Every structure is written in C-alpha cells, then in structure tokens.
Amino acid sequence: FIYLDYQATTPCDPRVVETMLPYFTDYFANSHSDHSFGQRANQAVETAREQVASLLGVLAQEIIFTSGATEANNIAIQGAVKYRLKQNHTARQVITVCTEHKSVLEVVNALAEWGIDVVTLPVNREGLVDHEALKEALQTPTLLVSIMAANNETSIIQPVNELAKIAHEYGAIFHCDMAQIIGKIDHLSLENIDLASLSGHKIYAPKGVGVLYVRRKPRVRLSPLFYGGYQERGIRSGTLPVPLIVGMGKACEIMCQEGKEEAQCLIYYKKLLIDGLKHNIVNIKINGSIKKSLPGSVNLHFPGVQALDILNRIPHLCLSTGSACTVSSLMPSYVLLAMGLSKEEALQSFRLSFGRMTTQAQVREVIDALSCAYHDIMAGR
Ligand code: PLP
C-alpha cells in the first residue's frame, strides 16, 4: 500500500509513541493530584504545553488541550459567542466561509438556536475569500468571524492574518481552524488570530488530542461548553489525557526541528507528481492555486473520467475523493462546488497528500499508476 491521505490523518511518529509510552504505565498519575507522582504527570503536561506554544510562537498559558480540532472549534465558536451574549453584546451575527470543515459549519449553523444570524461567504475559483465581501458582511455588527487557514480538501491557504485584521477593525473576534496548516508551512504567524484550533492526528501525534489557542493580550474570554473540575482554566474541564498530551507536545517539537526541511521535501514531491502527471495526461487540471496550497497536498481533476473509477483501479493507493469526515464518495465535494466546479468536474476530482513517510520511489509509482488507470479508462480497457 502507498498511503496518500495525510490530510485525513497521519500515522503516529514512532518517536512520539516512544515518548508517550511511560505515561500509560509508569507515570499514570492524574496530573491534578497534589502528590509527587501527580506532579510528575503535571510537569509532562506543562512541557507539552511549552512545546506546542513554541511551535505556534505563542505563550504556554495560551494553550488549552482538547480532544481534537472538532472540540476546539466548538469551544472557540460557541464559547466566544456565549460569553459575548452574556455580556449583553448587541451584535447578533457570525461570519464564516462556505468551504470550512463541517466542524465549523455545523457549529455555526447550530447558533441559529441562540438567535444568531450566520453569513456564509463564498470563495472564488482559487478557493479564496474576497476581502471586500468580508468587509461588506462586517457592516452588520458581528460577534465572531471563523475562517480556516488551509482547506482539508484543496489545501488552499487563506491569508488569515489579513482577514483577521479586517475582522478586528469591525470589533469582531477572529477564530481560525488551523488543523491542516500547523507545522506544514514556515513563517506561520498567529499575530492577529484570537482563537485557533489544532488537531494532533494531522501532525503525527495520536488521535484524540488537540489544542485550542486562546489569545491573552488582548484577552479573549470564553464560556465553557461543559462544566466540571475546572481543568484547563475551566475552559475544558475533565481529567487530562497525559499520554496523548505528551505525544502532542513531542509531535510539535519534531515539527519545530524538522518541519522546514520536511516541507521542502514535500514541495519537491508535489512538483514531481504534477510534472509527471502533466507529462502523461495532457489535460489534467489542478483545482485551486498550486502556489497558495500546502506543500505536500494537491487536488487533481481528471477531465472525462470519474474519480471513483480511477481509485477503484488502484486499490493499493490509499486515496480518498474528499474529506474523510463528511462526504460519501458518491457525492460531489461541497468545497469544489463552492469554487465553481460543476458537479461533473467535482466528481472527476480527488485530493492526494504526501507526508513524512512518503518516499520518492512511491511518488514515481503513484505517477505511473494514476496515468495507467486514466489511459485504460479512456481507452475503454
Ligand atoms: N478541521 C479541519 C480543517 C480538519 O481537517 C479536521 C479533520 O479532519 C478537523 C477540523 C477535525 O479534527 P479532529 O479530527 O481532531 O476533530
């Protein structure tokens, strides 16, 4: 098998697993216990917090551990809106974008129950939000704007710091789903971001752990979604999963040390793939801009051929037509439709992502396998 679905999830890095293991057995104490055993676990959590903060270039106190990006998105969006409503804020609007992950779109839609009006901005053919459209929507007083940094299907990167700046000019809080981008690009700045969500399993840490970044200066306040033992400053109560958090920290440390080099390698593999496919399949297209996308990921469009037909011919390549979290493979991607592709074009497209364990030999094999599958289908073989 060749794994080509790093946007859906990544394997745990063996170094991450190794670091986690003692915290399942030897140092299993509750990190909130006062005894020395508990303190040892607590120290490990705080080290992990530093490691995450260091990757993001923020303060350790700004890091809240969650079960993943879905939970972080929920706490950020619902928590910020709930807090501001309790403060008798007069704004009643939340703005997001139609190509967001479902863990943002569904949360925002659920806010209607609280009397919130939701504006869902469109994107252009490149998958980008129009700054003027955001400004126009912000003419109505707005509680929060939520826009992702990199899309999970197309890997298109939005200029979120610029968008956040606009949101601030109109007094809105800016939340950013950063699950796909963390550790993948250099010079990522959270300068204007108030709230950011991360997921462990996208960066070679285990599934079931994530992070919510909550800005301290100026302080962003959140109401909790559930109540309990006041862990994580009361924003996310519940006993901390120390081994998972240790794994998240280690994964961030590795990204800090190796992310830049890894990105260069993935950029090279992506170029190799695109050049190879373009050479073999002259009319192949790329959905969205290659320049404004994540290093190892691409969304490919094979005109005239159903994506599923291609994938069925290459079962040894682990690829998916869209987001693992939402779409049935038979449905056209809502992200591609929003970018202006027809239903037919969307069904002729799929995403492909390389990662840490990808080799150059695999990339070459992928080029050959995809090209053969395409030409066989076109030739009716
Ligand atoms: N946001 C984005 C952009 C994602 O790609 C994902 C994962 O698919 C999530 C949120 C959800 O993350 P998690 O699986 O950690 O809840």
Image (tube, rainbow, N blue to C red):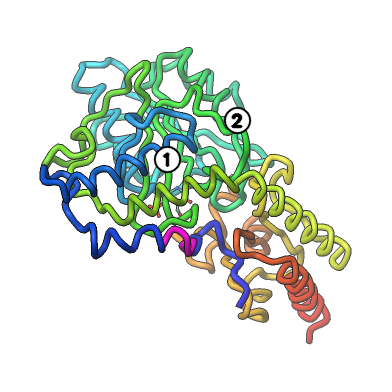
Residue 236 position (above or below residue 344): above
Rendered image quadrant of residue 354: bottom right
Depth check, front residue: 194 or 325:
194
User: In the drawing, does residue 204 fall left or right of residue 262?
Assistant: left
User: In the drawing, does residue 69 fall left or right of residue 79?
Assistant: right
> Quick one: label 2 or label 1, which is nearer the N terminus?
1
Residue under circle 2? 159
Looking at the rendered structure, the secondary structure element under dot 1 is helix
Q: Residues within 10 Å of mark 1 (few under 14, many from 20)?
A: many
Does the magenta-highlighted stretch encompass residue 123? no
- The reply to whether residue 205 is in sight is yes
Of all residues shown, which one is farthest toward the bottom?
A: 381
Spot occupied by residue 202 in the image (x, y as percentages of width and height): 48, 54
Real-space Cα separation, disc 2 to disc 1, in angstroms = 22 Å
Residue range (magenta): 12-17
Q: Residues within 10 Å of mark 2 (few under 14, many from 20)?
A: some
Spot occupied by residue 27 in the image (x, y as percentages of width and height): 23, 57
The residue located at (18%, 39%) in the rendering is 231
The residue located at (66%, 61%) in the rendering is 349
Looking at the rendered structure, the secondary structure element under dot 2 is loop
Q: Amino acid at mark 2?
A: Pro
Q: Nearer the viewer, mark 2 or mark 1?
A: 1
Residue 251 position (above or below residue 234): below
The residue located at (69%, 66%) in the rendering is 359
What number is the disc on residue 52?
Answer: 1
Depth check, front residue: 68 or 380:
68
Is the stretch drawn in magenta largely helix, strand or loop?
Answer: helix
